[in-house]
């Protein structure tokens, strides 16, 4: 996995690094994967994942984000509806009306493409 080679720091053996591990994970609160994602809530119908910086940075981050994932199955219509919502922000940035967005526009656009690729890739693994 490219991400693992890129920035797998020592002591991160508790992270999931392979798609085969993610495929069977229950995504309980506290689960960490690829040193950039940590499950912060799992209500049973929705999973919320913190992303951006590393979970090694527990406080405010210059690059931060949340991903909300859910799926609802309608057995009568034999239909599954998936929801994927993400937000990229800087939790460590100055607050107030005069504060500017600290995430450069180019990074925001790259994040949008990245989210689209993740979503399309994940949907290819949904079985009928």
Image: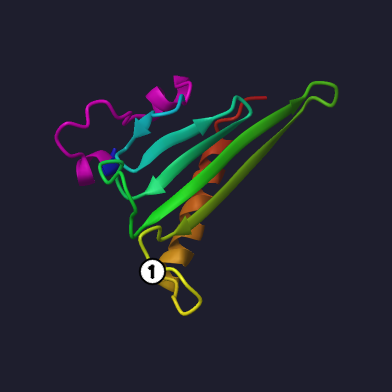
Kindly state the secondary structure of the residue where label 1 is placed: loop
For residue 35, side relative to residue 30 (left or right):
left
Instruction: State which quarter of the image contains the C terminus.
Output: top right
Judging depth in this view, the residue of 59 and 13 nearest the camera is 59
Residue 5 on image: x %, y %: 21, 41
For residue 126, side relative to residue 53 (left or right):
right
**Membership of 117 in magenta stretch:** no
Residue 126 on image: x %, y %: 60, 29
Q: Is residue 30 above or below residue 59?
A: above
Q: Is residue 44 above or below residue 98?
A: above
**What residue is drawn where x is 27% and y is 26%?**
14
**What residue is drawn where x is 35% and y is 60%?**
92
Residue 33: image quadrant is top left
**What residue is drawn where x is 58% and y is 28%?**
43
Question: Counting other residues with Cα less than 10 Å from the Cα at mark 1, is it few (<14), some (14-19), or many (20 or more)?
Answer: few
Single out the residue that lies furthest toward the right: 76
Residue 121 on image: x %, y %: 51, 41
Judging depth in this view, the residue of 124 and 3 nearest the camera is 3
**What residue is drawn where x is 35% and y is 32%?**
32
Q: Is residue 20 above or below residue 9?
A: above
Residue 4 on image: x %, y %: 25, 39
**Residue tagged 1:** 94
Instruction: State which quarter of the image contains the N terminus.
Output: top left
Q: Is residue 62 above or below residue 40?
A: below
For residue 116, side relative to residue 93 (left or right):
right
What's the magenta region? 4-27
Single out the residue that lies furthest toward the bottom: 98
Q: How is the image coloured?
A: rainbow
**Membership of 7 in magenta stretch:** yes
């Amino acid at each position: 996995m490219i991400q693992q080679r890129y920035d797998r720091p020592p002591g991160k053996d508790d992270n999931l690094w392979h798609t085969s591990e993610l495929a069977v994970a229950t995504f309980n609160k506290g689960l960490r994967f690829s040193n950039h994602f940590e499950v912060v809530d799992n209500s049973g119908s929705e999973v919320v994942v913190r992303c951006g910086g590393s979970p090694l940075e527990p406080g405010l981050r210059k690059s931060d984000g949340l991903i909300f994932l859910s799926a609802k199955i309608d057995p009568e219509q034999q239909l599954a509806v998936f929801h994927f919502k993400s937000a990229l922000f800087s939790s460590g940035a100055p607050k107030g009306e005069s504060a500017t967005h600290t995430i450069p526009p180019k990074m925001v656009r790259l994040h949008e493409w990245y989210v689209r690729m993740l979503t399309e890739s994940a949907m290819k693994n949904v079985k009928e």
